Image (tube, rainbow, N blue to C red):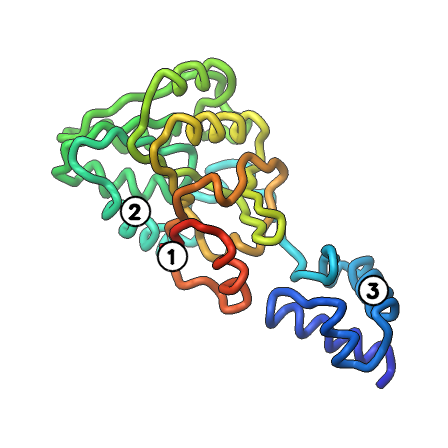
Amino acid sequence: MFAEERQNQIVAMVNKEGSVRVKDLSEKYGVTEDSIRKDLTLLEKRGLLKKTYGGAVKKRINVHDLNVAQRRDKNIEAKQRIAAKAIELIKDGDMVFLDISTANLELAKLLVKSSLNITVVTNMVDILIEFMVPTSVRFIFIGGSFSQGKDGFVGSIAIRQILEFHFDIAFLGIVGVDLYDNSVATYMVEDGLTKSAILDVSKTTYMMLESRKLNMDGTYKYAKIDSFTGAVMDTAAPEEHVDKMKEYNIEWL
């Protein structure tokens, strides 16, 4: 088999299975591990995969949707499915935090119409607007520095307010989850620091996770995957991620 044919097959395998190991590829193709490493280096330079220790994983995507206006009307049905699952986790009497997330915006729409005896706290402007109607839910808004994405308030002033609370449950937005790096990312540093503060003062915390974001990257890592209680997802995880997800002791809902 020519090297080019082997490399094409490796790319196809990574895209199908999510990851490959040097040792397994060496045995499969009957070549040295050093030859496989050279293949992976070449394929990484071409932007076709990402090398990891002992192997490679599928190339991740960063779409740079920095502003909420860019995200609000995308994948609405997926976000609605996540919101429908998330509201089932909320109990009467809960103090709930909804941070800057378009999936949380869909959850807010459900909570406004609910009869739950809860308090909702948020730093997201669009969620504030949803609660400007008659509702039985008590509502608190966190102020601070207006985010670069023009969607909420973040930074030291917002963090100082957040740290005064003890939340029963918090739902956090994410840009990407890297199962191989044990990391959860967002775009803005100030947003990430604010999310970290929410994690620190919440009894239970859930990622609002569209399954496609398992293959996406942000620009700032704000938490480890196992810092969360779980992740609320729109669909079952893609098959190539299932085994890796089992390594984390969190709920994948």
* CB within 8 Å, label 3 to label 2: no
Residue bearing mark 2: 86
Residue bearing mark 3: 37
Real-space Cα separation, disc 2 to disc 1, in angstroms: 10 Å
| Frontmost residue, 193 versus 123 | 193
Real-space Cα separation, disc 3 to disc 1, in angstroms: 36 Å
Real-space Cα separation, disc 3 to disc 2, in angstroms: 43 Å
Residue in the picture at 29% in, 32% down: 168
Name which residue type carries label 2. Answer: Ala
Q: In which quarter of the view is residue 4 placed?
A: bottom right
Helix, strand or loop at mark 1:
loop
Helix, strand or loop at mark 2:
helix
Residue in the picture at 24% in, 25% down: 139
Residue 228's place in the image compared with 164, above or below, is: below
| Frontmost residue, 174 versus 228 | 228
Residue in the picture at 39% in, 26% down: 201
Q: Tag 1 or tag 3, which sits nearer the N-term?
A: 3
Residue most extreme to the bottom: 1
Name which residue type carries label 3. Answer: Arg
Residue bearing mark 1: 234
Tell me the quadrant of the picture where the N terminus can be found. Answer: bottom right
**Discs 3/2, front:** 3
Q: Position of residue 185 (x, y in %)?
A: 56, 40
**Discs 3/1, front:** 3
